[in-house]
Image: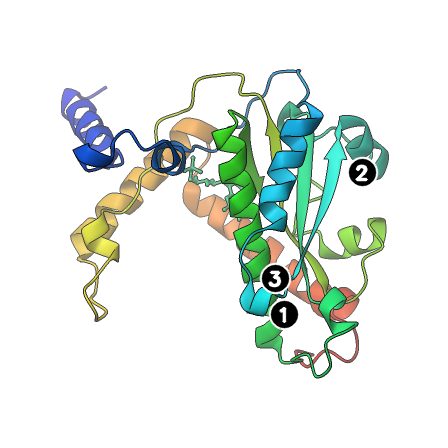
Amino acid sequence: MNPWHLVRGLARLVAGRPRTPRALAGNETLRTVLERRSIRRFTDRDLPDDVWRAILEAGRVAPSTVNLQTWTFLVFDRAGWEATFDRSLPMGAPRAIMILADTHRARRVVEGFPSVPMCDHTVGVMNASLAAMNMTVAAEALGVASVMLSETGKTGFYDVAELATVLDLPPGVVPIMTMVLGWPAAAPPPMPPRLPLEAIAFAGAYRETPQRVLEDWYEQMRAGYRASTGQDFQRQIDHYNRRLEAAERELRERVLGPDDPVR
Ligand SMILES: Cc1cc2nc3c(=O)[nH]c(=O)nc-3n(C[C@H](O)[C@H](O)[C@H](O)COP(=O)(O)O)c2cc1C
């Protein structure tokens, strides 16, 4: 490898490390949030029931718009996943939580529940995402590794119609991700490239991130993607574009239902 690239790569790794003010370095919650990594290899060992329950409990108490709790968690162990989807649980994990944005439940009791697309597509998805994040952080705090997945073969959120059929989902219930969890089988990888704080946090008014910073970050993303998957990042984006178009069609035709204002 070109020594210049190596030095630049190392410098980026060091620069990208989360920075914590020295006085706060001992704070365990902060450490958990800053050092969490997506883990994609798990040991065979299952999670004990109390650990599993604590993680789900963190999802249950997550914040949500007007406390509407527009989420459902479908939980699986290996046998349950195989029985449902006829394939192994992704990445050899012992457990999975499929997180569903769910405005269906609230609609059954809340009179005049908003029926604009904005509600399903932001309130539902936003709250369910926050619950997912609460569960990831709780898992991390308990030493349990996890990764959120949009694509899990024939079971990810791009497989809208398949999921709605296999899981018998009512309209207004949309899977947004599957989190797989377990004990980590390897040390966490280095943090994938993050934009620097100065490029994303501005006092009071929006500013354009300098082009040079963006291009540097994108170059790191592409190199990291190639190193970890052997694939070209741009090709993957094209692949997602095709999957998303098909998913969008299925969502409108099969899941949102004839009364949905999006149609
Ligand atoms: C909604 C969502 C979907 C994701 N889908 C995938 C996926 O399909 N496959 C995968 O390997 N990682 C997936 N990830 C994990 C991201 O690649 C990961 O969070 C990102 O690279 C940053 O790495 P870190 O979580 O270790 O900080 C997903 C993350 C999120 C939040």
Q: How far from the left and from the top, in percent, is residue 185?
A: 54, 16
| Between 143 and 8, the one nearer to me in the picture | 143
Q: Is residue 145 left or right of residue 227?
A: right
Tell me the kind of residue under disc 2.
Answer: Phe
Q: Amino acid at mark 1?
A: Asp
**Please, is residue 109 above or below residue 72 in the view?**
below
Residue visible at 24% across and 58% down? Answer: 201
Q: Is residue 87 above or below residue 58?
A: above
Instruction: For marks 3 and 1, give the CA distance.
Output: 18 Å
Residue 35 point in image, percent of width and height: 37, 32
> CA–CA distance between discs 2 and 1?
26 Å
Label of residue 120 in the image: 1
Rendering quarter of residue 16: top left
Q: Quadrant of residue 174?
A: bottom right
Q: Is residue 90 visible?
A: no
Q: Is residue 96 left or right of residue 196?
A: right
